[in-house]
Amino acid sequence: MTLHLKGRLWCVGGLKNQARAATSQWLLLFFLSWKPPPFLPEAPFPLQSNSLRAWLGLKGPEILENQIQVFTHFIYLHTTRALGRELQETKTSQFYALSHHPLDYRILVMDEDQDQIYVGSKDHILSLNINNISQEPLSIFWPASTTKVDECKMAGKDPTHGCGNFVRVIQTFNRTHLYVCGSGAFSPVCAYLNRGRRSEEQVFKIDSKCESGKGRCSFNPNVNTVSVMINEELFSGMYIDFMGTDAAIFRSLTRRNAVRTDQHNSKWLSEPIFVDAHLIPDGTDPNDAKVYFFFKEKLMDNSGSTKQIHSMIARICPNDTGGQRSLVNKWTTYLKARLVCSVMDDDGTETYFDELEDVFLLETDNPRTTLIYGVFTTSSSVFKGSAVCVYHLSDIQRVFNGPFAHKEGPNHQLIPYQGRIPYPRPGTCPGGAFTPNIRTTKEFPDDVVTFIRNHPLMFNLIYPIHKRPLIIRTGTDYKYTKIAVDRVSAADGRYHVLFLGTDHGTVQKVVVLPNNSTRGELILEELEVFKNKSPITTMAISSKKQQLYVSSEEGVTQVSLHRCHIYGTACADCCLARDPYCAWDGNSCSRFYPTGKRRSRRQDVRHGNPMTQCRGFNLKAYRNAAEVIQYGVKNNTTFLECAPKSPQATIKWLLQKDNDRRKEVKLNERIIATEQGLLIRSVQEADRGLYHCIATENNFKQTMAKVNFKVLDSDMVAFMTEKWSPWTWASSLQALQFHPKDLVGSISHSELQLINQYCKDTRQLGQQAEDSQKMRGDYSKLKALINSRKSRNRRNQLPGS
């Protein structure tokens, strides 16, 4: 970070503890009175003045644009630490990418039996080790033909994001082969890939001729393709034409006849965006199992003037072969129902999170108790937000066994169908428990097939558990895109831990608390898994390996599900974290094992009460904190830093003067509490004293910071900055209590050389304009160095990103 103060150059980087806090104080002393020279380089990251005002809690024009620049440098270095190095040392994450260029990675298959993860990307297929994705990866270069790429470009498609072979389908065909499909530069292709019988064989090659992927993979790589392989038959949801107008749920790669949805019938599919597909049992008879497709589609309202987005679930029987006289080679068991995720207002109106983004099936021993987690966002331009809703499979099946929808009247209002329901009930699979004597759908009576064609929609809606979302996020700058869920056994019960990917390249780890808790969910931590805020595209979780796998256009990241060391080295901090993966073992916060000795563990996920869990572990020590001294200049602005370790904690500031009783700091327009600390605008003599930052969580209080704040006369500070060199000034202040060697101890020799060279070049720039090009070159290196050290409190950037 470079600072020009009254013509003098300051270089500050990698400050430690007390030195960093004290130096930050002196930087802020001149924040409102400083004017940067015209050659000061840009801030290393974009922070607008409005966001800075919000961070400081300021309103109005108090902060000038030319003063924002220096403070962005300070905020950037002050709030980011090199946590990536620590994560690498503890082996809690790995990153892999083929190149520095974005290749649109998608995790398509996780095979825990062979310890492999199969990833599709632009022109490549990857096989990654499930234990360590960066260890001995295998890849196949599978580009589209030159002819197809040229034709794609001539058709006006995007050369970078469209005219390549984007692998979108990888399915396990048998024990030795995978079936893979790619967009093929808007000409889909498929092939068989030999992966060998065991991963130790290191076999990974395409050993068949490419065949047409039409009906198996979408032409446009930006249009989702979902698929599931059942008994060497491929069931896909995609768009079947070049123009992207013919959406279909298709069965291909079959010895039987190919079957699809009724073409250009908006009752069946209306501009769908497919999200996922799963084979789910329905009872004990395997012939009753059904393939469920999750998607969202645009439907006309009753007036026929506007289109609304609805999230839907459709299902078909895998053994459906179509009708005999009607719906030939079309599904005769196709039904769909609307999936609702909404909040009820006080006046009884519903606000819908209407766009389904992702689903996750949390399976149990009993298929009927399977839970389906869904991530939803809003399509409204006024109301923005994300939500997570949870559904019982039994509730979904109950809707499909309920009344059918029928349009009637001049307004085509949907009402329950009141006529005779033909036998067997439409949507029933042949050869199942209810139709043992019907071997194929071609034996269905004509009235059953006709009914399915005209009434595929169910009347009842599918509501989540308790008819409300489990998690709601509104007013945020991100939205959820993906979800994975793990079931965790803790000392006080079993918990569901949600991993929620966002469109800002982060993953939130959230624990779901029991219904009788004051809060339904808690954010345990947030990981920055991709540096460029690339949206999360896919996620896969392995409870067996205790690992989470995340992809974006940048690459693939592997993260451990339990990272107990981040909660500190004290019993109370470990207990307050309320992470079901972690417990206090008497010495540290470590992985919790349900089979461990009870006397050696301390864990309270439901209440998070350290008073009952941490007796005998020196709880009184939390009332004390190391005292630091900070200086403020009269009539200037200062900032006292204090950030809680937990997002659930509340902060209170107390002021003690001359050994008097501590009194709560009165907040007003001049003294403002922010999430990062206490901002004092226009420091006065009465502001001096000992400030205590007290964090309270679950009625447990601990002192986070003690700041002995002293007020200096502005004339004295002006004299010091005019007469003394920067390093002499900093070293001479007794309150700072550090030597310049303390500064260089936190950075490497190469980093120090780069910073010194940058400072030297910047000084010369003030006098010699001809050196400007060299300074910009070295600044770009420094900017890259700074970015590589970025991280946040419980918002951690992973190595390799």
Image (cartoon, rainbow, N blue to C red):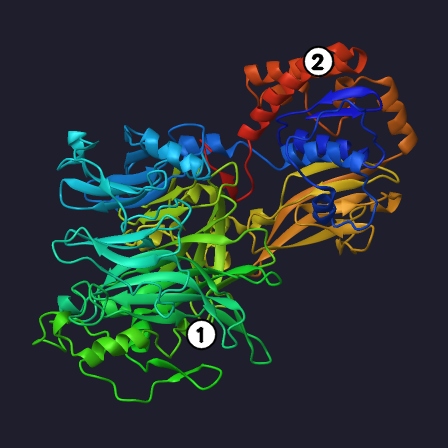
Identify the secondary structure beneath mark 1: helix
Residue furthest out toward the left = 437
Q: Which residue is mark 2?
A: 761
Circle 1 crowding by C-alpha within 10 Å: few under 14, some 14–19, many from 20? some
Question: In the rendering, at what x and y percent does residue 667 appear?
Answer: 78, 55
Dot 1 amino acid type:
Lys
Residue 429 placed where, x, y %? 17, 71
Q: Secondary structure at mark 2?
A: helix
Q: Quadrant of residue 195?
A: top left
- What label sits on residue 467 in the rendered view? 1
Query: Is residue 25 visible to us here?
Result: no
Does 587 sit left or right of 12 as displayed? left
Location of residue 641 in the rendering, given as x and y in whole percent from the top left corner: 68, 42
Mark 2 or mark 1, earlier in chain: 1
Characterize the local packing of mark 2: few (<14), some (14-19) or many (20 or more) Cα atoms within 10 angstroms: some
Quarter of the image where the N terminus is located: top right
The answer to whether residue 723 is visible is: yes
Amino acid at circle 2: Asp
